[in-house]
Each structure stands twice: as structure tokens, then as C-alpha cells.
Image (cartoon, rainbow, N blue to C red):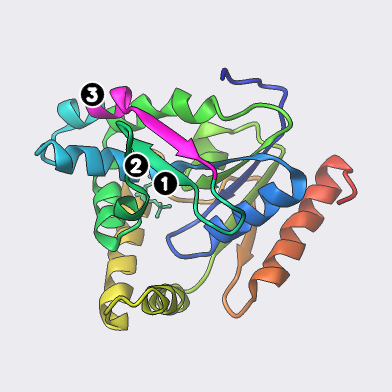
């Protein structure tokens, strides 16, 4: 599908583990909008590079890969993650690992990678609307978005949330390791020259430390309601 600039966009940006993914899913469901998990594209690029034995800092080669990625997003049941196919292979679980997330943040600063993924992301802007989750949705990819939210939370709380998720999946992880990985990823994502992680000037900054998902959802939906007059 091609981008339709008149379709409304809601952007949800912020650092890793701020709860953007869950809120994006809930808002998209509530409004019947499409969903873009832009981080998945960076994760897929990193995974494809690893599978082909390409170094993550080889901008030329990783950029070419990003341009030619054969990706399919298959929506699952509600509450389930979207299934992701790379060259026809189901890589849903492979792209969700901590290693893949950290590798994604190593290919993400490369300008050729970001340029390769730009139009692919913009093509998600179709009717009835889009909720887009990432780092630069409101600043670079959809600067004209109707509603922009920047969700954050303390690094400690984000590490703790991630710890609980991984424990529930039966993974053996240490909270101190997760915290230092989150801090490293924040530094890489915020410190890069291209599309650094930062709130758009017109974004609502929501600090979700100590807040439950329902409270955050109400705040986001209230903002949507105020901005476009839609009663939800
Ligand atoms: O959101 P997620 O954790 O899946 O993103 C993985 C990595 O991809 C981030 O740490 C970031 O480096 C990169 N990313 C990005 N721009 C986006 C989304 C993700 O640079 N819009």
C-alpha cells in the first residue's frame, strides 16, 4: 500500500521498555487503526545481517539489506504479538531477544539503514489511521502526525518491567544486567547524530514511572479525543 497523507497518525516514541508496545496495541485496537512497530524493522535488519554474516557496522552492506528486506507482518490474535516473517521464515521469537534488540540499536545509527527504512514505514500511513511506535516517529518519519506522545520511565523501572516479562517467559536473567543494557541502549539511541531519541517539540511527554497501563491508556486516549474531537 502507498502512503496516504490524509490518514491520521498517532506517534508513540520513547526509550526501550517504556511500555510503548502495549499502549500502541491498545490504542490501535480501540480506534481500529493500523499499527507500525518500527523497532521490528531495525531488529529484522540486524537479524538479517547476522544471518548473512555481515558485520553490524558495515553501513554499505547493512543498508543494502535494509532496502531489500522481504518482510511480512501477520497480525495475530489480540494481545499476541504480530507474527513477523523474514524471507518467508517465521522470526517472531528471534527478533524479540535482548541480543537482537541490542544489535538493532547498533545498525540503527547508520544513515543508509535509516534512509532505506523510511518510505517502508511511511507506507503504513493508510486509512482509517495509524498508531506508530518507535524512537523517531514524531520527529522524522511522521512530523505532521495528529497526536504525538513521548513515553518514558526511569531506567530502573524499565529494567524491572523487562525482568518480570522475561521471568514470566521462563528466561534466566539478572536485573543488573538488564539495567546496564537499557542504559547502554538509551545512550546509543539518544547520542546518535541521525534521528536521535528525543521528544518532538509538540509531543506530550508522559512519565509512566509508577503508573499502570490503564492509567497511561486513559491519558493517551484523552489527548486523542482533545486533538481530533473524536469521542472514544
Ligand atoms: O523498539 P525496539 O526495542 O524494538 O527497537 C530496537 C532498536 O531499534 C532501538 O533500540 C533503536 O536503536 C532502534 N529503533 C530506532 N528507531 C525506531 C525504532 C527503533 O532507531 N523508530
Task: Work out whether 108 lies above or below 205.
Answer: above
User: Contact (CB < 8 A) between labels 1 and 2?
Assistant: yes
Which residue is painted at 56% across and 20% down in the image?
1
**Range shown magenta:** 65-75
Q: Which residue is mark 3?
A: 64
Query: Helix, strand, or loop for circle 3?
Result: helix
Q: CA distance from mark 1 to mark 2?
A: 5 Å
Ligand 1: does it lie within 8 Å of the C-beta at label 2? yes
Ligand 1: does it lie within 8 Å of the C-beta at label 1? yes
Which residue is painted at 32% across and 41% down in the image?
44
Q: CA distance from mark 3 to mark 1?
A: 18 Å
Residue 207: x %, y % from top left: 60, 68
Q: Is residue 188 left or right of residue 53?
A: right
Which residue is painted at 70% across and 50% down in the image?
29
Task: Work out whether 114 lies above or below 11.
Answer: above
**Lower position in the chain sequence, tag 3 or tag 1:** 1
Q: Decide whether residue 72 is among the magenta residues.
A: yes
The foreground one among 184 and 19 is 19
Q: Which residue is mark 2?
A: 42
Which residue is painted at 56% across and 30% down in the image?
124
Q: CA distance from mark 3 to mark 2?
A: 13 Å
Ligand 1: does it lie within 8 Å of the C-beta at label 3? no
Amino acid at each position: 500500500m502507498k502512503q496516504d497523507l490524509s490518514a491520521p497518525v498517532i506517534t508513540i516514541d520513547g526509550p526501550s521498555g517504556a511500555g510503548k508496545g502495549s499502549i500502541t496495541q491498545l490504542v490501535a485496537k480501540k480506534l481500529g487503526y493500523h499499527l507500525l512497530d518500527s523497532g521490528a524493522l531495525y531488529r529484522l535488519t540486524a537479524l538479517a545481517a547476522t544471518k548473512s554474516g555481515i558485520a553490524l557496522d558495515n553501513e554499505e552492506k547493512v543498508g543494502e539489506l535494509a532496502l531489500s528486506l522481504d518482510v511480512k507482518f501477520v497480525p495475530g490474535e489480540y494481545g499476541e504479538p504480530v507474527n513477523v516473517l523474514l524471507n518467508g521464515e517465521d522470526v517472531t521469537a528471534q527478533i524479540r531477544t535482548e541480543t537482537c534488540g541490542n544489535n538493532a540499536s547498533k545498525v540503527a545509527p547508520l544513515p543508509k539503514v535509516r534512509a532505506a527504512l523510511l518510505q517502508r514505514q511511511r507506507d503504513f500511513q493508510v486509512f482509517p489511521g495509524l498508531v506508530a511506535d518507535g524512537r523517531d516517529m514524531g520527529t522524522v518519519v511522521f512530523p505532521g502526525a495528529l497526536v504525538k506522545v513521548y513515553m518514558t520511565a526511569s531506567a530502573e523501572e524499565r529494567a524491572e518491567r523487562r525482568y518480570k516479562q522475561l521471568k514470566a517467559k521462563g528466561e534466566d536473567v539478572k536485573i543488573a544486567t538488564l539495567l546496564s543494557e537499557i542504559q547502554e541502549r538509551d545512550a546509543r539511541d539518544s547520542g546518535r547524530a541521525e534521528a536521535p531519541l528525543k521528544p518532538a517539540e509538540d509531543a506530550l511527554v508522559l512519565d509512566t514511572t509508577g503508573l499502570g497501563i490503564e492509567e497511561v491508556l486513559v491519558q493517551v486516549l484523552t489527548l486523542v479525543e482533545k486533538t481530533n474531537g473524536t469521542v472514544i
